[in-house]
Image (cartoon, coloured by chain):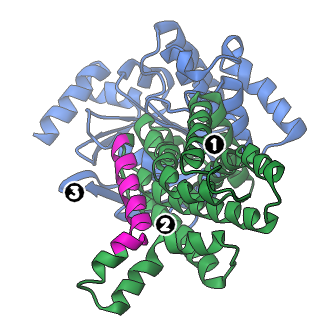
Amino acid sequence: MHSFWAVFKREFKSYFTTPLAYVFLVIFLFFSGHMTFRQGFFEARQADMRAFFANLPLLFVFMVPATAMRLWAEERKVGSIELLLTLPITVTQAVLGKFFAAWLFLAIALVLTFPMVITVCYLGEPDIGLIITGYLGSLLMAGGFLAIGGFFSAVSKNQVISFVLSVVACAVLVFAGMPTTLNYVSTFLPAGLVSAIENMSFQTHFESVQKGVLEFKDLSYFALLIGGWLAASTIILDERKGC
Amino acid sequence: MISVKELRRSFGPVVAVDGISFDVEKGQVLGLIGPNGAGKTTAMRMLACFLRPDSGTATVCGVDILKNPIGVRRSLGYLAENAPAYNEMTVGGFLNFIYDVRGIEGKKRRQALDRIVPMCSIESVYHQTIETLSKGYKRRVGLAQALIHDPDVLILDEPTDGLDPNQKHEVRRLINKMAKDKCIIISTHILEEVEAVCSRTIIISKGRILVDSTPEKLKEDYQCSLDEVFRKITQTKVA
């Protein structure tokens, strides 16, 4: 257990010893606010955060892989993976330690969007429950993207390659659930397959959590997604850590 | 304390280590020497449970590298080639991370730090980030990392590569000092180093053991310097 915490602590601190964390936070906060107000936050004349949450998937598609790409690719490039995995740490502990450290970092980024909440509360009387589930859905989505990004970071030594691959993978999972995509595929695919695609996508599950509906199928979707990609990273690292 | 049986590993069509076996006892310093690409690093990586062997196995302090890799890593100090470390960390932060991983806490950690930092002479760079260090200091930080928990078995991959003559001398003195109550394997290209620190030497080439002897005995047998012995053995036997 202490090796998990050691990896977690080191990894989390390393975000803040390099400029990475600050660059990320500033850009994330700027765009999350910018997109909300461009979407017509005031014009909607509603005290809720729908405009804010609706844009997060798009922002996360780029921002989360940017946090995840260094997780393993950097270790491989520098060679420190040989140090890490010859210490008494299992690959699983290392994968989990890194994942949770990065997840906590993204959680902090989400917490720092609190001025939005204050704005909404000042302007009207929002449904606090909706805001909380909105944040929960965003956090779960960040975790899902992070697990995908971590996997592609474990696949390649090159951070740019792992970034591009995980952006594509995350984008596919988001856009598969967009109405435009679903309308298009339903012209030639049977209804069963269309709903399979819909259910595999982030968008569908994110939206239903964000609407305040906490269903088992949505939560288990995120849990399976995170668990599955983390398990895949573990296997990949075990197989090819020395290459 | 280390017992290697028929260890074999290949990368695609290239056989890096081709069925090597040997035993090392406490108090021995074994020098693994051989040309580039002979399989020294691969063999050491397998002993440190970083790479899995294709076949064969080994035990370190009685613990099997296949059955209990974590147990092996616990009792082992390993310095990888080029002494990899986390470059953005300070030396102190890095050593504390290793202590965290190895679960050495509180008073024991302070005692270990007081022992290890002067031993590797890294007091002057303790608060510097690792990426700003010279090659020699970096390697000494790596050495400190490997010695932190006072392991019974040490595996050092080219511990003096890139050091200046004074630093080389320091590291050799350090190894000689520890030799009595530990079991140490080092790999090197520098044959004078073998004479200076090793009580036994194994010459490998193309993944096979060619000679298992002591430096003194080799010189006696061939009636020439170790350099010539090395050339004779690796060039004739392989060709």
Residues at marks 2 and 3 on the same chain: no
Image quadrant holding the C terminus of chain B, namely: top left
Query: Which numbered disc, 2 or 3, marks the residue closer to the eye?
Result: 2
Q: Is residue A95 visible?
A: yes
Q: Which mark is residue A229?
A: 2
Which of the two residues, A101 or A134, is positioned nearer the viewer here? A134
Q: CA distance from mark 3 to mark 1?
A: 33 Å
Q: Say if mark 3 contacts mark 1, CB within 8 Å.
A: no
Q: Is residue B165 left or right of residue A45?
A: left
Identify the hue of chain B: blue
Q: Nearer the viewer, residue B66 or A213?
A: A213
Type of residue at label 2?
Trp
Instruction: Name the spot of residue B220 as percent of width and height, x first.
Output: 33, 26
Q: Is residue B168 left or right of residue B190?
A: right
Chain coloured green here:
A
Which residue reaches farthest right? B107
What x and y, as percent, mark residue A65? 47, 49
Circle nearer the viewer, 3 or 1:
1
First in sequence: mark 1 vs mark 2: 1
Q: Are marks 1 and 2 in contact (CB under 8 Å)?
A: no
Check residue A11 in the rendering and tell me which mark sits there, or answer none. Answer: 1
Characterize the magenta stretch by its predominant secondary structure.
helix
Residue at 43% from the left image edge and 50% from the top image edge: A153
**Spot occupied by residue A131 in the image (x, y as percentages of width and height):** 74, 62
Q: Is residue B21 visible?
A: no
* Chain part drawn in magenta: A160-181
Q: To which quarter of the image does residue A157 belong?
A: top left
Q: Secondary structure at mark 1?
A: helix
Hey, which quadrant is residue A1 in on the image? bottom right
